[in-house]
Image: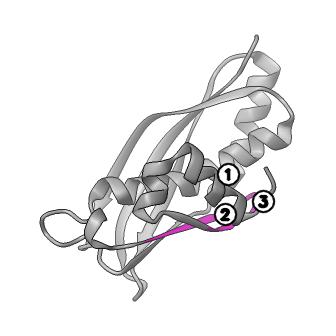
């Protein structure tokens, strides 16, 4: 999979349809940073007329996971990936367009190389910060990713 947001957005349509239908889109990706975006709408809101926390979580997770997928693909090895743990903090009502940014891509390669070398699973935490259209932080999500070389 190339480092193109359009390919990832097509991927989400087929493999993560609930994220796609809620409006989660990858807008930028490179080896170090990924950005996703989702707009508050009627069908992704909670009873308090703000974005449902799980929709924010899907967008935040994609901003971390897209880089993991890309770096696994780049390794050329069969490696499984899974979120083992996560936590979140909500600081403001999420309305309008929310943008999630993860700048922890530098953590992935070392874990991939260790699992390839040892065959043992590796874990690492990645953070994604959500801000509204005014640049005000609305939530922070942390994901503990696990990677493990298959067949060892």
Q: State the residue lying farthest toward the top.
A: 152
In the figure, 136 relative to 86: above or below? below
Give the position of the C terminus as an image quadrant.
top right
Q: Please state the extent of the stretch shown in magenta in the rendering.
A: 27-38
Image point (56%, 53%), residue name = 13
Q: Could you say which is closer to the camera, residue 137 or residue 9?
A: 9
Comparing labels 3 and 2, the label whose residue is closer to the camera: 3
Using the rendered view, name the quadrant where residue 90 is placed.
bottom left
The residue where tag 1 is placed is 67
Whole-percent x, y for residue 25 in the image: 55, 65
The residue where tag 3 is placed is 3
The answer, for residue 38, to whether it is visible in the render is yes
Give the alpha-carbon distance from disc 1 to disc 3, as whole Å: 9 Å
* Label 3 vs 2, first from the N-terminus: 3
In the figure, 24 relative to 40: above or below? above
Disc number at residue 52? none
Prevailing secondary structure class for the magenta stretch in the rendered image? strand
Image point (69%, 44%), residue name = 69
The residue where tag 2 is placed is 33
Q: Residues within 10 Å of mark 3 (few under 14, many from 20)?
A: some
For label 3, the SS is loop
Whole-percent x, y for residue 28 in the image: 66, 69
Indicate left or right for 123 with 40 as reference. Answer: right
Give the alpha-carbon distance from disc 3 to disc 2, as whole Å: 11 Å
């Amino acid at each position: 999979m190339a480092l193109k947001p359009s390919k990832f957005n097509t991927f989400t349509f087929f493999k993560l349809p609930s994220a796609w239908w809620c409006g989660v889109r990858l807008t930028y990706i490179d080896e170090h940073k990924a950005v996703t975006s989702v707009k508050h709408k009627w069908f992704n809101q909670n009873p308090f007329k703000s974005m449902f926390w799980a929709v924010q979580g899907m967008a935040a997770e994609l901003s971390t996971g897209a880089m993991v997928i890309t770096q696994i693909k780049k390794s050329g090895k069969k490696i499984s990936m899974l979120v083992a743990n996560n936590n979140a903090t909500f600081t403001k009502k999420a309305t309008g367009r929310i943008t999630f940014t993860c700048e922890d891509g530098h953590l992935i390669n070392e874990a991939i190389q260790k699992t390839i070398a040892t065959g043992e699973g590796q874990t690492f935490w990645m953070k994604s910060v959500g801000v509204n259209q005014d640049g005000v932080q609305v939530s922070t999500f942390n994901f503990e990713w696990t990677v493990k070389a298959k067949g060892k």
